Amino acid sequence: MNFDEIIERRGTHSAKWDNMDKLYNVPADTGISMWVADMDFRPPACVQRALQGMLDHGIYGYFGDDRDYKAAVQWWMQTRHGWEVEGDAILTAHGLVNGTALCVQTFTQPGEGVAVMAPVYHAFGKVVRGSGRRLVELPLKADSGRLEMDFATWDGMIDAGTRMLILCSPHNPGGRVWTVEELRGVAEFCQRHDLILVSDEIHHDLVFGGAKHTVMVKAAPEALDRTIVMTATTKTFNIAGGHTGNIIIPDPALRKKVADTLWGLGISGNSFGLVMATAAYSPEGAEWVDALVAYLDGNRKLFDDGVNAIPGVKSMPLEATYLAWVDFSGTGMAPEEFTRRVEQEAGIAANHGATFGVGGDTCLRFNLATPRARIVEAVARLQKAFGDLQ
């Protein structure tokens, strides 16, 4: 568990490191990549051993008999989240963006509305619009440096043609861990407006301090007939390239509809992803995650202290995820100017806030899941790039 090790990722077909020059005009040789949400750490040794076992066997056929995989998912959800999941409730997607798309395809028609709480993970909007559906952006309120839900406003924004709400829990990019009361409010909102509720909980293992994640179906069991929960090992263990995620649907009738879509599109499991996930959801994997969260917490504190020392710049308190949401509005700069300074003067590639939708224009998202030496360097570069504000 040497999270301080610098692992060179340039030239390895890394979206995060090999695309920053093209997308952000940040020099590939000297830039720091802090955009795409994957980590610069190797996964736990149990995952590496599982892959080595596949290599040693040397035959890479179709994956069959997923009982071990489902048992591992069940064990993890029970021991880490207090959620007892039936094996039959677990469907497998090629990652949770794919899972989101499958739900959109299953429960909505072209032209119908799909609601999200904005600003939010940008892939939701891409999937919704790419499917020919309407994206309904429900604006979150910024209150004392935290994003808050606003049901009173949202009630007036849902029309009869809106069919689904996608919840990001914990929230990306704001880092909020929603309370049980807030989650119940979401379920009641969906019941009021007859919406299918898709709860993307991919960051649920990466929670800091006194915050506690609650699975949506545990917070509001009365809404089981309309609730879909999506989870994955990919963010937790840095194995996103395995493209494997869980669509967990307790209600049999709801589940059959998604299963029919999966079969209709010819989607089946990725053997490498399923083997990695089975190995990760284990006591050894759990020990690794505990060490990871402690390390990320140190990165979070170091980064926040550094950027919050820049006049007019504020990093939103991070309760979960490894993605810092930094607001530059206090500088008085236009987005083009503070973004130029981050990219051209600091040499850092960070996600542009506008891509996350309403409420994101004055922000950038920074990935903190990298060795601490890079966080120290990034903070120093940012302080220098905005040094005239000191």
Image: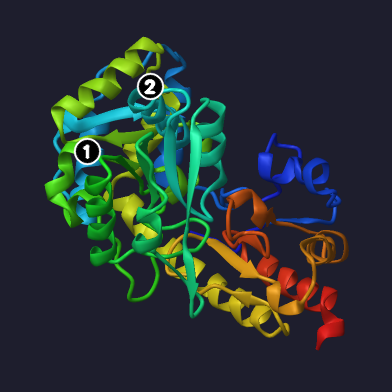
In the drawing, does residue 12 fall left or right of residue 101? right
- Which residue has dot 2 on it? 269
Tell me what residue is drawn at x 41 percent, y 53 percent: 203
- Residue closest to the eye, 161 or 83: 161
Measured Cα–Cα span from mark 1 to mark 2: 25 Å
Disc 1 vs disc 2: which is toward the camera?
Answer: 1
Tell me what residue is drawn at x 82 percent, y 77 percent: 386
- Residue 96 falls in image quadrant: top left
Whole-percent x and y of residue 280? 36, 43
- Which residue has dot 1 on it? 226
Whole-percent x and y of residue 229? 29, 42
Whole-percent x and y of residue 41? 56, 53
- Vertical order, 122 against 31 (above or below): above
Tell me what residue is drawn at x 29 percent, y 24 percent: 258
- Residue closest to the eye, 211 or 148: 148
Residue 128 in sight from this viewpoint: yes
Dot 1 lies on which element?
helix
- Residue 196 falls in image quadrant: top left
In the drawing, does residue 38 fall left or right of residue 93? right
- Vertical order, 385 against 44 (above or below): below
Tell me what residue is drawn at x 74 percent, y 70 percent: 377
Tell me the quarter of the image containing the C terminus: bottom right
Dot 2 lies on which element?
loop
Which mark sits nearer the N-terminus, 1 or 2? 1
Residue 239 in sight from this viewpoint: no
Whole-percent x and y of residue 314? 63, 77
Q: Are marks 1 and 2 in contact (CB under 8 Å)?
A: no
Q: The disc labelled 1 sits on which kind of residue? A: Arg
- Residue closest to the eye, 247 or 108: 108
Q: The disc labelled 2 sits on which kind of residue? A: Gly
